[in-house]
Image: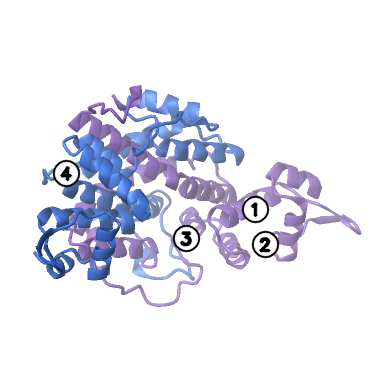
Chain colours: A blue, B purple
Amino acid sequence: MRISELSRRSGVPNATIKFYLRKGLLPPGRATAATQAEYDETHLRRLRLIRALISVRGLTVNATREVLSAVSEHEADVHQVLGLALGAKRVDQDGEPDTQPGMSDVDALVARLGWQLSEHTPARGVIAETLETLRSLGTDFSWRALVPYAELAQRTAVLDLDQLKDTDDALERAERAVLLTVLLEPALLALRRMAQEHESAVRHGAIPGPSVPGPGGG
Amino acid sequence: MRISELSRRSGVPNATIKFYLRKGLLPPGRATAATQAEYDETHLRRLRLIRALISVRGLTVNATREVLSAVSEHEADVHQVLGLALGAKRVDQDGEPDTQPGMSDVDALVARLGWQLSEHTPARGVIAETLETLRSLGTDFSWRALVPYAELAQRTAVLDLDQLKDTDDALERAERAVLLTVLLEPALLALRRMAQEHESAVRHGAIPGPSVPGPGGG
């Protein structure tokens, strides 16, 4: 296909595609004339993954190029590709595991759950930070209280991975993983807020007050 | 207790407490001398809720004052207080329900789940937006695919509400609800990322590549 069709099918503007070609994110097409090239389905899939990494995951152009090259290198290894696309594995795996405060709690949690995780997963740091913050605010919330939350997260992850089963193409799978993982995040938090409201209504009743009318509040 | 002890026990600096007193977020203490006042446990609980609403939920001072006054008005109604503290119910409930695109999908989802929700829950808009974005990117992800996610969110909300069972004090319960709901959000997303990595390792195996060494990746 010509670049204009590639643009139409990917939703990425012509000028942006040319920019990605210049930056080496997208490999050149097959030259058909001095100023024309022909692109194929692999370009389309790669372009969609680029869009997901830049627009949805918020990576820079340089970081995207590094992820793409690592993905190409490991294309046969689905686990590797998903980890790279989602940022669970760093492109550059050198360096020590993180040693911030609270990390031993995270290790205890992961050990209890029996999860197989890379030592570099940035998510570990988020858990450690959250536990530290809750502790500094005087709550008695410990890593043990996270275990049932983690078990539900595991069931959520099963749903996530099920969404990727329909495709065997590594790039397409990586794109869908980024879209579903990142874009669903605010929706999953919103579902939790809504479910809290429902659960609170069930437990504590919803007494319609004068300032909160409406059928939904009753 | 004196203001210095209130500061020590709440972790809120003296000057900030005085600012909250001037702004009417905190009711005055009982005057014991021309320049001295005595504060009690209700001040402490209210101060902790103020801190949670401002630092954790990110409300402005004015918005916090409105929430506090609505909470005081409905103190006997646990469901109302939690809804106000978490932002599920607006302090000002006037106005029409939102009519943004995708909202009928959210109504269909809520109806399927049988959830009792106020019409003004901002979370509805987040779900509608997410479904619109996923549609615009060409995925076939519909509200029906959210149903199993919502069922897991409901079980998460049960865990959340269980954390609030130990206290009967409305302000304390509201504070804990804000802390646990808002502060756990990044941790819950991190748990999902970690669970995805584990689930991917289980399904697709973790083939140790030359650039990804380490016991965690094997």
Position in image of residue A140 (x %, y %)? 55, 34
Question: Could you tell me which chain the residue with mark 3 belongs to?
Answer: B
Please name the amino acid that badge 4 sits on: Ala
Residue where numbered disc 2 is placed: B25
Q: Earlier in the sequence, mark 1 or mark 3?
A: 1
Question: Could you tell me which chain the residue with mark 1 belongs to?
Answer: B
Residue where numbered disc 4 is placed: A170
Q: Which quadrant would residue A151 be assigned to in this image?
A: top left
- The answer to whether mark 1 and mark 3 are in CB contact below 8 A is no
User: Going by the image, does A8 lie left or right of B195?
Assistant: left
Residue where numbered disc 3 is placed: B87
Q: Earlier in the sequence, mark 1 or mark 2?
A: 2
Please name the amino acid that badge 2 sits on: Leu
**Kind of element beneath mark 1:** helix
Q: CA distance from mark 1 to mark 3?
A: 17 Å
Position in image of residue B121 (x %, y %)? 39, 63
Front position among marks 4 and 3: 4
Front position among marks 1 and 4: 4
On the same chain: label 1 and label 3?
A: yes
Residue where numbered disc 1 is placed: B46
Q: Residue at x 24, y 42 (%)?
A: A71
Q: Residue at x 38, y 23 (%)?
A: A111
Front position among marks 1 and 3: 3
Q: Residue at x 43, y 46 (%)?
A: B186
